[in-house]
Amino acid sequence: MSFSTVGVIGAGTMGHGIAHVCALAGQTVVLYDVDLPRVEAGLRKITSNLDKGVEKGKVSPADRDAALARIGITVHLRDLAGCDIVVEAVPEKLALKQGLFKELEGLLPPEAVFATNTSSLSVAGIASVLADPGRVIGAHFFNPVHIMTLLEIVVHEGTRGDVLARTQAWGAAIGKECITVKDFPGFATSRLGVCLGMEAIRMVEQGVASAEDIDKALVLGYRHPVGPLRLTDMVGLDVRLAIGEYLARELKNPAFEPPALMRQMVEEGKLGQKSGVGFYRWG
């Protein structure tokens, strides 16, 4: 069974991006957030990004209009009841994700898939509160979702084979290149990316080079599309700090331990792109 109707929980950076790519691929989308201003802001961002696609000749005006027509917004979880798959893109708090899925379990049919966009939390841990944990799978997208082609699919020991197969087919249908990894702390992408990011921050802290030159070394010397410090700004220093603490604890590896400079910047509110200043100045 393919997914024709997709529910997205959370209209922030990741959520509105997921809604964007699904709607553009021809799927009906129900976009949820806790209040109307947030979900309306998410829809405005989708509209803005689609408009930019039209300006660049990557999206036709007709496709933009059709995609926007496929997106419905809501502040009621019950409106997700008809979805074939629900993707949560809420903050990295285990209890929050568990609570949402537990509530949805009573609303959606047994064949509906529950996907988590977590970048580091245990998928099995999120699934553990459900009567049927086998319906839960990780679907880790990357920012900006409408540009980045990777989808990291994460399976825990109980994830059913049909859930994996349907999620892989869905990923391909929305234009993503999928990798499949086991439910291990940091998966493949966060484990590599956060380790590199922490080392880059330590280099700034030690005065090895400027943030700009460290990033330039990776972009020009190793063909990275974006440097680790600029990426940390884009993700959010507070988000990466929390992930680093989690991975350092779970993997018992000091390479993931957030440097003192990072903690200081977070305390000062220098969170990166969303605050206007981090390792770079934004906006």
Image (cartoon, grey):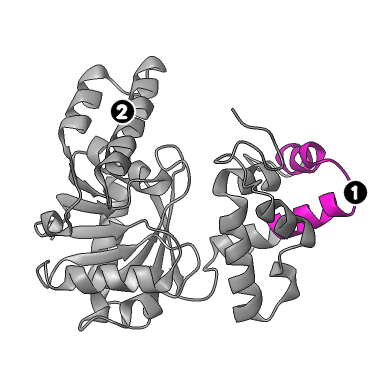
Picture disc at residue 47 = 2
Q: Amino acid at mark 2?
A: Thr
Residue that extends furthest to the right in the rendered view of this protein: 207
Q: Amino acid at mark 1?
A: Val
The quarter of the picture where residue 182 lies is bottom left
Q: Is residue 48 left or right of residue 192?
A: left
Instruction: Answer above or below: position of 203 versus 137.
Output: above
Magenta-span inclusion, residue 140: no
Q: Nearer the viewer, residue 34 or 115?
A: 34
Q: Secondary structure at mark 2?
A: helix
Q: Nearer the viewer, residue 167 or 136?
A: 136
Q: What residue is at 74 percent from the left and 74 percent from the top?
A: 254
Q: What type of secondary structure mainly makes up the magenta span?
A: helix
Q: Secondary structure at mark 1?
A: loop
Q: Which residues are magenta?
A: 197-220
Task: Residue 221: give x, y in percent of width and height.
Answer: 77, 41
Q: Is residue 12 left or right of residue 187?
A: left
| Residue 148 makes an appearance in the image | yes
| Residue 156 makes an appearance in the image | no
Q: Nearer the viewer, residue 93 or 130?
A: 93
Whole-angstrom CA distance, mark 2 to mark 1, is 42 Å
Could you tell me if the residues under marks 2 and 1 are in contact, i.e. CB atoms within 8 Å? no
Task: Residue 107: give x, y in percent of width and height.
Answer: 11, 67
Q: What residue is at 39 percent from the left and 59 percent from the top?
A: 117
